[in-house]
Image (tube, rainbow, N blue to C red):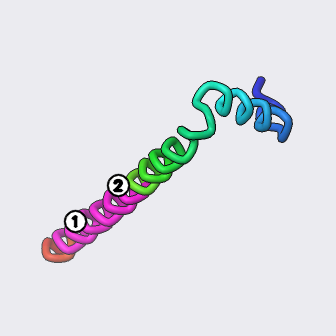
Amino acid sequence: MFEGLFRPMHLLLILFIVLIIFGPGKLPEIGEGLGKSIRSFKKALSSEDKEDKKDASIIEQGEEKKS
């Protein structure tokens, strides 16, 4: 269904439409906001991963004490 959706010509067309809608002045602000949101998303994922590992180690330690 989505085969060939993101071909280079399609991406160029999308970029052209975004440029028309927002103008060249707003593109740096949009890029900055997008970059910040991606960084915060990655940070949240890594902190969740650390918490999961911490919880797993606590559970393992509890199981070792019971044995």
Amino acid type for the residue under numbered disc 2 = Ala
Q: Secondary structure at mark 2?
A: helix
| Nearer to us in this view, 16 or 44 | 16
Residues shaded magenta: 42-62
Classify mark 2: residues with Cα within 10 Å, few (<14), some (14-19) or many (20+): few
Residue 50 position by quadrant: bottom left
Would you name the residue on which mark 1 appears? 59
Residue 13: where, in percent of width, then height? Answer: 78, 31
Q: Is residue 6 left or right of residue 50?
A: right
Near mark 1 (Cα within 10 A), the count class, few <14, some 14-19 or many ≥20, is: few
Quick one: SS at disc 1? helix
Residue that extends furthest to the front in the rendered view of this protein: 25
Which quadrant of the rendered structure holds the C terminus?
bottom left
In the rendering, at what x and y percent does residue 29 appear? Answer: 49, 44
Q: What kind of secondary structure does the magenta stretch mostly adopt?
A: helix
Please identify, in this view, whether the residue under mark 1 or under mark 2 is nearer the observer: 2
Query: In this orientation, which residue lies closer to the viewer: 47 or 63?
Result: 47
Q: CA distance from mark 1 to mark 2?
A: 22 Å
Q: Which mark is residue 67?
A: none
Quadrant assignment, res 24: top right
Asked whether disc 1 touches disc 2, contact meaning CB atoms under 8 Å apart, the reply is no
Amino acid found under the numbered disc labelled 1: Ile
Where does residue 25 sit, x and y in percent of width and height?
A: 56, 40
Q: Residue at x 77, y 23 (%)?
A: 1
Residue labelled with disc 2: 44
| Of residues 36 and 46, the one drawn nearer to the viewer in this rendering | 36
Q: Is residue 52 above or below residue 26?
A: below
N-term-proximal mark, 1 vs 2:
2
